[in-house]
Image (cartoon, rainbow, N blue to C red):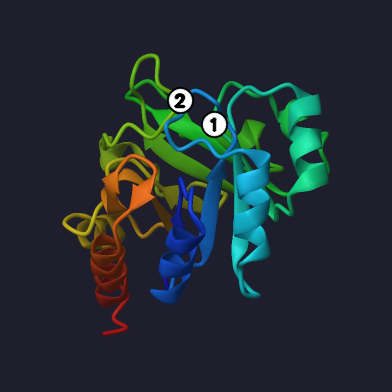
Amino acid sequence: MRTRVKICGITRVADAHAAIAHGCDAIGLVFHAPSPRHVSVERAREIVASLPPFVTVVGLFVDAEIKVVRDVLHCVRLDLLQFHGNESPEYCRQLGVPYIKAVRVRPQTNLLQYAANFSSARALLLDAYVEGKAGGTGQRFDWRLIPAELPQPFILAGGLDAGNVGEAIRRVRPYAVDVSGGVEQEKGIKDVGKIAAFMQQVRMSDGQV
């Protein structure tokens, strides 16, 4: 099965189109104001309205009030929610929209227990733990911490770029990979050449090239 790709932190229509042109499966829109990749509802609507069919749109939130998430859902077509904070399973389920739950992995993280707690998640997104940061740090974690018997599909994130995504796929065989900073020229602005190189490495690792 081929490795799916989500390119997160999209802030411009042109960057969304570049990601799709090079074969990504999903784009991520960040609705977390402290992030340098944050998008307004108006900009998100513009991006989503420009997309061709069969592209999954993921909305990323960090410990947002339920009303905030509902308001975004009312205005923007999101196929999947990504919760990147300390949200509970009950919080994630109550919106009635498919979701993935991010886990910031460190040695003491019990990923099997996490998977059991969030059994309603479509997947777990495994990212690096950096004190005081919800994500998007560009740091990678020790992939040996991922148990072989995780019951859900998992999405590998954290410090991925064209130079290491091939190794990541070969070593841990994730359902999908998630990249943001690794395909940027600056925070929030994607680099078409880096996107192309990243996607090429994914295809090569899957034996598609």
Of pointers 1 and 2, the one earlier in the residue sequence: 1
Quick check: can you spot residue 163? yes
Q: Relative to 78, is 136 on the left or the right?
A: left
Would you identify the image quadrant in which residue 187 lies? top left
Q: Position of residue 38 (x, y in %)?
A: 51, 35
Q: Position of residue 43 (x, y in %)?
A: 61, 47
Q: Quadrant of the C terminus?
A: bottom left
What amino acid does circle 2 point to? Answer: Ala
The residue beneath circle 2 is 134
Q: Secondary structure at mark 1?
A: loop
Count of number-bearing discs: 2
Q: Relative to 4, is 69 on the left or the right?
A: right
Tags 1 and 2 touching, CB below 8 Å: yes
Q: Relative to 102, is 96 on the left or the right?
A: right
Q: Residue furthest top?
A: 132
Residue 27 versus residue 23 in the image, above or below: above
The residue beneath circle 1 is 84
Q: Secondary structure at mark 2?
A: loop
What amino acid does circle 1 point to? Answer: His
The CA distance from mark 1 to mark 2 is 6 Å
